[in-house]
Amino acid sequence: MADRTERTTTGSSHRDREREMQPYVNRFEPDRLWSTRAAAFRGELKPYVGYMAQSGFPGVMLLMLIVATIGYAALVRNLPPHFPVTAFGVVLVIGFTCWSPLRTWLKPADTVFLLPREMEMHQYLRRSFRYTGIATLIGVWFTLLAYWPMYKLGEGTANAFVLLLALTALKAGNIAGAWQERRTAEAGMRRSLRFIRWALTAVTLAALFRFAPWKAVLFGLLVAALMAAVYRLPRKHALPWDTLIREEGRTRRRYYRFLALFIDVPTQAPRIARRGYAGWIGKTIRFAQSETYVYLYTMTLLRTELGGMLIRLTLLGMLVLYWFGDAVWLDGWGASIVFVLLAGIIGLQLGSLRQSHKYAVWGHLYPLPAQRRIDSLASVDRIAYIICTILMWLPGGIALAVHGSVLQALAAPAAALLYGVLRRPSAVRRKALKDDEED
Amino acid sequence: MNQDSKHMNRTGQGPALEVTELVGGYSPRRPVLHNLTFDVRPGEIVGLIGLNGAGKSTAIKHILGLMQPHSGEVKVNGTKLDADPERYRGSIAYVPESPVLFDELTVDEHLRLTGMAYGVEANAFNGRMEQLLDEFHMRAKRSAFAEHLSKGMKQKVMIMNALLADPPLFIIDEPFLGLDPLGIRSLLDRLVEVKNAGAAVLMSSHILSTVETYCDRYIVLHHGRIAAQGKLDDVLRAADMTSGSLDEAFFRLVSETAGGGGMSNGR
């Protein structure tokens, strides 16, 4: 009996393997290859997801969602008189509307093995468009659902069905636009096009949320025609292999970086952005042996995706907190509540800095005391945390102070400062030491 | 501190690297290295040669302190790693077989980081960096990230970092892979220069003609044992030859003793 079971499992696993190989061996079957690869990725993540679930993270997220919902309901119920309803809607909805990722599961080796099949890749990519397109479209609908109660309080006059249709069309346009950007050969051009697409989508969304629907739709059609003309300009690839492979790698890294918060995952090379405007920060670090790791961690923070995320979070926080501060929501304490939430996210993201250089061979070879790395990590983390949170608070805090709510303006940054200076460094140090012991 | 220790060593007579009866490897039950004893003195370049899998990289890892010996000891600059880790580490610069760069740092910033880590004096740093950038023709690439460097350029960055640190002992593992002819020449010129200034160099390579020309002594490693070591005459003698090149002697040593360990007693 046992013997038979075993034979069946080996038989089936053999069959599985055969099936996995088939898309390559017999004839090219794009559909099957796509499914095999999607399943492989899910299988790859499965063990880690279990750890994530055990960590209590889903519970915390759920709790945060509930708190946010209650807060949002309270905001809608007592909407301050000058609250920027349209701008709030644009910020809420634009993310899912413009962001059009594409999971292609393509890898570097494909430029050798799949490249000859370029002509037959349409079917393969159609699966990718459907997969990510539907996911982000659902996101758009959800954000619309969230925005709807506030929209009704603003100046917009469209009914829900019209908005739903308009946003779906806008999403489709953005997916098409994002694809043309991927095909664009030059990186600078690609970035400019993406910026234009986001900016024009923002304006279209604002028109949609503010004016009569027919005006907004007319405007949207004009924008679409303009973009279609602009997208014809640059030199383009038929199929942008390198761009798609890079994007796929980036997405995988994101998954792994997220999972790294809970459990050790295979390390992947980070994606680097130069961020020339922040280059001066590295030069301010004193050229001294004791500052070696401060320099290294600072550069890591500035140049990796972590830095980009912190910059975006800080900017978004500045905007949102300004609105809440300026509206003196909940007697001015509303901004503090949102601040705690955002500062928490910043702190959590910043925590992933300790995953960098954990295994770097140079850490073992440099003539520096072993403890030095962790001390420097804690000090870079502390400074970054304080700079991000204080910057994020500034506009809202100033607005509160102008409205005469001085206590409300000072409480939040004081708390962030105390936590950042007194509490956070020792927590970072403890976690980093624990990581080292586990390895 | 680092600069002082180097100075002490270069005026003193002790070896920069002293390996005694080293037995090592990944698993204690299956040692890869068997009783290695050799030294590298200030002012000489020693070539470490052997087939793939002979144990060269494992030996280098033991010297760097990345692996623990099963028995025997390694001293750098007269110190064991446990006794004074900072002095030990500060005395070695390492050029790995495959370049290991930080993705987020430019060429310039790698040099700066190394300068900081090895305690190079701030005043001397800029001059040395500029000189290295010129010597290795990397000036145009000074602001490039690792991702945009070719294999050979990455190797140059590793070599420039080692030279910048300017320690008493250089450990260089297969440095010529991917280097262009100008890079090879700059490296060899600089190695002769640091040697004349009193540094010790242990270099592993498969390019035996270059090893023969530039090294003062050779260590032939085969199946984790030292099959021969010394000057060319010593290696020839171990291979039962009276004249010939290092290449011929090496070929005889590794083919005659393919099943065993040369001068030691086989497996």
Image: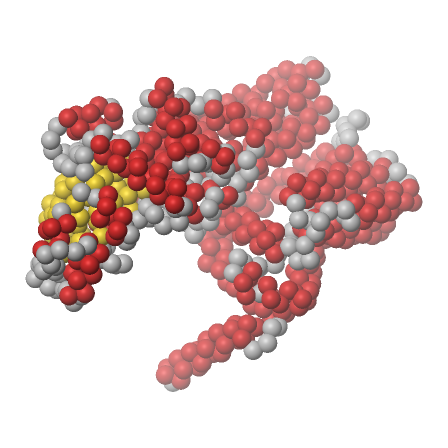
Q: Is residue B15 left or right of residue A26?
A: left
Q: How is the image coloured?
A: secondary structure
Q: Is residue A174 above or below residue B162?
A: below
Quadrant holding the N terminus of chain A: bottom left
For this view, does A268 lie left or right of residue A336?
A: left
Report the residue at 7% width, 62% height from top: B265
**Depth order, front residue of A217/B167:** B167
Query: Which is more toward the observer, A2 or B58?
Result: B58
Q: Position of residue A240 (x, y in %)?
A: 64, 55
Residue in front for this viewpoint, B237 or B198: B237
Image spot of residue B101 (x, y percent): 41, 41
Q: Position of residue A396 (x, y in %)?
A: 66, 23
Front residue of this view, candidates B113 and B242: B242
Q: Quadrant of residue A71?
A: top right
Left or right of B56, for residue A248: right
Q: Residue furthest left?
A: B265
Residue A300 shows in this picture: no
Identify the image quadrant of residue A430. Answer: top left
Say if B260 sits above or below A419 in the image.
below
Residue at the image point whose x is 29% and y is 52% from the top: B207
Q: Quadrant of residue A403?
A: top right
Q: Is residue A212 above or below residue A166?
A: above
- Judge from the rendering whether residue A78 lies leftward or rightward of residue A247; answer left or right: right
Q: Residue at x 71, y 35 (%)?
A: A74
Q: Residue at x 17, y 34 (%)?
A: B42
Q: Position of residue B121 (x, y in %)?
A: 33, 22
Residue B165 seen: yes
> Could you tell me how many numbered marks the image carries?
0
